[in-house]
Amino acid sequence: MRNLSEIWIKKETLKTLYETLEKKGEKGVSLTISINDETNQYGQNLSGWVSQTKEDREAKKPRFFVGNGKCFWTDGKITKAEQQQSNVVDAEVVEEEDDDLPF
């Protein structure tokens, strides 16, 4: 294990995440976690938001932040995770745009 971190998510944010997933008919949500070298005024160096597609990032869509936290243990060695190749063909996913949803 290379690091241990924790993130705190408000109940209201969890409710928003759940309601949005229900409206979109999705089974789950992917979160992006950023760990910074410096801490903020609250002793936190981790933030998390709903992952964005390349198109969302290029369109400069705002991130939907879910929470903040801290890395409380590390051995100083974090390696990049590499996806293993599989023989499964991904099904095409058709997304409907619903502008009143947060992500």
Image (spheres, grey):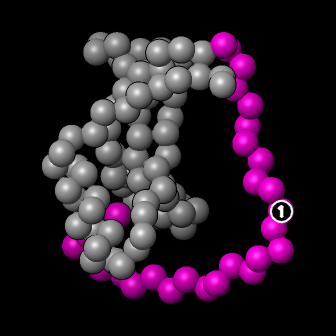
Taking the image as drawn, is residue 46 in sight?
Answer: yes
Q: Residue at x 35, y 64 (%)?
A: 103
Nearer to me, 38 or 17 = 17
Q: Which residue is mark 1?
A: 85
- Left or right: where does residue 71 sit relative to residue 41? right
In front: 59, or 81?
Answer: 81
Horizontal side of residue 61 vs 52, given as left or right: left
Q: Is residue 87 above or below residue 9?
A: below
- The part of the chain drawn in magenta is 75-103
The N terminus, quarter of image: top right
The overriding secondary structure of the stretch rendered in magenta is: loop
Q: Tell me the residue at 32%/45% (across/down).
A: 66
**For the point 39% across and 85% down, which residue is it?**
96
Disc 1 crowd rating (10 Å Cα; few below 14, some 14-19, many 20+) is few
Q: Amino acid at mark 1?
A: Gln
Whether residue 9 is in magenta: the answer is no
Residue 84 lies in the magenta-colored region: yes
What's the residue at 48%, 56% (across, down)? 30
Q: Is residue 41 above or below residue 101?
A: above
Q: Where residue 68 appears, x then y in whole percent?
A: 34, 31
